[in-house]
Image: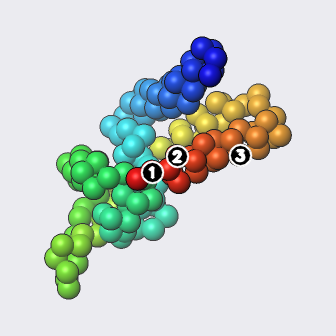
Amino acid sequence: MKAHDEDIYNFIIGRTSLLVNRILLRTFRKHDLDITMEQWSILEILWKKDGCTQQELGQRTFREKAGITRLLDKLEEQNLIVRVPDRIDRRVRFVYLTAKGKSIEEISTAIVKETYEHAIGNIGEEEMAVCKKVLNQVYQNLHDAEI
């Protein structure tokens, strides 16, 4: 591996993700939204299917149990979600949006969409197709190798 290749692998994906998250956080704050991109990813799932289990949210966001619990704790603290134990199996908890959680869908989704559109604004369709293919293959390679 050449030295410059190492820089590419170490920085491009990570720094891009960090920058997107930083821009989104700043823009959320400008609109008085006290959420992070990680929290938004949970809310987005609930906006499409309210009443998911904590386990399902963890699987769909690729997070471990402890990580999803911390995110949900914060969202519940902010009165954006509530967790309701299953009547049959009290270990299972369903996550539901509150009125406040539902109320921020439109503005926060518009912010994310606008940010992503800006990020890929001058990239052609063919380039995006190649980028998606390569990143999906990188993900699959890592996923397949995961122990």
Q: Residues within 10 Å of mark 1 (few under 14, many from 20)?
A: few
Identified at 20% across, 81% down, the residue is 89
* Residue 86, quarter of the rendered image: bottom left
Mark in front: 2 vs 3: 2
Q: What amino acid is labelled 3 in the image?
A: Lys
Q: Residues within 10 Å of mark 2 (few under 14, many from 20)?
A: few
Q: Is residue 23 visible?
A: no
* Residue 94, quarter of the rendered image: bottom left
| CB under 8 Å between discs 2 and 1 | yes
Q: What amino acid is labelled 1 in the image?
A: Glu
Residue 8 screen position, x and y as percent: 60, 22
The residue lying toward the viewer, choosing from 19 and 137, is 137
Q: Secondary structure at mark 1?
A: loop
Q: Is residue 144 left or right of residue 52?
A: right
Marked residue nearer the N-terminal end (2 or 3): 3
Disc assigned to residue 142: 2
Rounded to the nearest angstrom, the CA distance separating label 2 from label 3 is 14 Å
Residue 146 screen position, x and y as percent: 45, 51
Residue 29 screen position, x and y as percent: 39, 30
Disc assigned to residue 71: none
Q: Is residue 69 above or below residue 88?
A: above
Quadrant of the rendering where the N terminus is positioned: top right
Marked residue nearer the N-terminal end (3 or 1): 3
For label 3, the residue is: 133
Q: Secondary structure at mark 2?
A: helix
Identified at 30% across, 63% down, the residue is 54
Q: Is residue 113 visible?
A: yes
Rounded to the nearest angstrom, the CA distance separating label 3 from label 1 is 20 Å
For label 1, the residue is: 146
* Residue 55, quarter of the rendered image: bottom left
